[in-house]
Image (cartoon, helix red, strand yellow):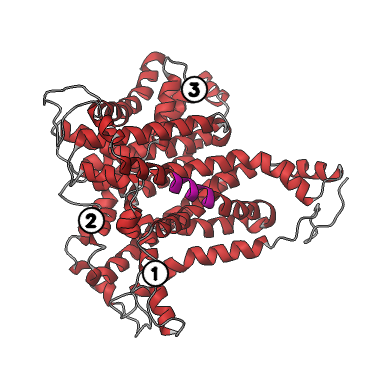
Amino acid sequence: MLGRRGITWAFTLPPAAWLVAFFIAPLVLIGAYSLRSGSGFLRLTDPWELSLQQYQRIADTPAWQYLLVVSLVMALVIAVAATVLAYPLAYFLKFRAGSRASLYLILLLIPFATSYLLRIMAWKLMLGPEGAVNSFLTWVGLISHPLDSLVYSRAAVVIALVYVWIPFAVLPIFAAMQRIERAQLEAAADLGAGPWSRFWRITVPLSLPGALAALFMVFIPTVGEYVTPALVGGSAGLMYGNIIQQFFTRAGNWPLGAALSMIMLGLTLVMVLLALRVVNLRRLAT
Amino acid sequence: MTTATGRRGEVGIGHTRIPLRGYFGAMLVLLFVPIALLFVFSISENRALTFPIKGFTLDWYRHIPDIEGLLGAARNSLVVAVSVATIATALGTAVTIALLRFQFVGRRALTAAGILPLVVPYVVLAAALLLLFRGLGLPLSLYTVGAAHVVVALPFAILIMVARMIGMDPALEDAAMDLGSTYPGALRRVVLPLMGPALLSAWITCFVVSFDEVALANFLVGTGEPTFPVFLFGQLRYPLQLPSMIAMAVLLMLCTLTLTVVAERVRRRNP
């Protein structure tokens, strides 16, 4: 039989090995690649010349820096909008839906379970010049020419992503609100607090960790987006993730792509560390 | 104490008059309209997604097998998602038990590494894994996609399992061992049965995460057989085949939808 020590190894070694091989090693490798000079598809065995050449090139290219700032701002706007729009939904589920809350929650999860690509595509098909919205408006006679400004813009990317993330953002907020005891609100009412006062002084502070978790659970995947901008953004709506993708595919410059990736990773981790000072993840897990 | 002002006989404390029910309803409609439109166009005779609709047909569903590679891509996604869900759930269970029951060096590091994929943008992880596989000369395939999907599914498995196991008393295992069971025996016969619903919920969540994932798969699948989302992403430029693609997507959507509803019900029944 396995000893106590053997059991510990049996439980920790497989996940540790998987994470080292497919999570930690690749991130270390991309960090190392970003410090190589040269360009193109450099192999591991090609000579390594360490330099800050790639970062220097990014520092000399204002267009990429601009796109990075734009992407961060877009991700922030999308995350804030999705969280703000989701908050009343979570509030309704917790405090107003009563016994039908779980049914309503499932209704909300249905769009979330629908393929993300399909929902983005639905927006594209709806908003495009030949799309459902334009052809419907033309058909009923509200407009005579299709509106072509609806798709292929930054605004289209923002709208599509907010739409995609709203149901997801409800979940952590709802989870945080589940821990609010009715007795806490009743106690406040007994002490003379009205509905608004109770909301601002009890519900909001107690659900804030959930709202912040929602904010970051939307922000992180969004800041690295390249699929949605490619589908609904067009050339006017590209994000920072699209440059990274291009340097790893068509444009084929791995060291430069690696440096661009490291900058995004670094900024994301800094923002997460800042958030962790506010949100206690351990409390959210329960 | 409290004053009875609530409706439905509930002891209430009154609330503002903001029409939250209306907001919730309007939001649901907004969320469902695009999905409903997709469904409508999968049975409409129109080749392009335009109004007015001329008539309804099931032809697009019948033409699904005619699109080269479509069924193969759906099968690939299914195989990858089932493997990923199984591996990620097994690894997630191991991490959870190790975290909550064992004392060992690197306990915090292992947990952190298991959760951290949540905060790494997919495009960065995809690029990093591409460098690793291509750098080592490994061919890109469904295996490389699966390896990546396990990494991003693992945090979900861990969070679901920890939420369940954190409320379980370790004395249950001690009792089993006092009665003569070995530790693995106690885990198998006491802990795992109690974890059942969480295991199923974690498995289904990981399945959906992998089945729907396109950003990582697009980097790591190579030029060979694509998964369904990668195939869909590549095909979106050919509007002629669009109705059948949508029909297939609607069919797959019904599958993941059923799974999600089952997962949610299981999770709710055993909080």
Label 1 resides on the chain identified as: A
- In the figure, residue B7 lies in which quadrant? bottom right
Considering only order in the chain, which callout, 2 or 3, is on the residue closer to the N terminus? 2
Left-right relation of A236 to A89: left
Q: Is residue A45 above or below residue B56?
A: above
Main SS, magenta region, reads: helix
Tell me the tag on residue B73.
2
Q: Position of residue A86 (x, y in %)?
A: 56, 53
Say which amino acid is labelled 2: Ala
Is A34 left, or right, of A274 in this rendering? left
Neighbourhood count class around disc 2 (C-alpha, 10 Å): few under 14, some 14–19, many 20 upward: some
Subunit that carries the residue with mark 2: B
Task: Assign the C terminus of chain B to one quadrant of the image.
Answer: top right
Residue at left offset 26%, top offset 38%? B127
Residue named by callout 3: B101
Residue shown at the point (15%, 49%) measured from the top left: B223
Screen quadrant of the N terminus of chain B = top right
Give the Cα separation between the discs numbered 1 and 2: 26 Å
Amino acid on which disc 1 is placed: Met
Q: Quadrant of residue B112?
A: top left
* Magenta extent: A73-82
Chain name for mark 3: B
- SS state under label 2: helix
The answer to which quarter of the image holds residue A256 is top left
Is residue A74 rendered magenta in the image? yes
Q: Which residue is mark 1?
A: A126
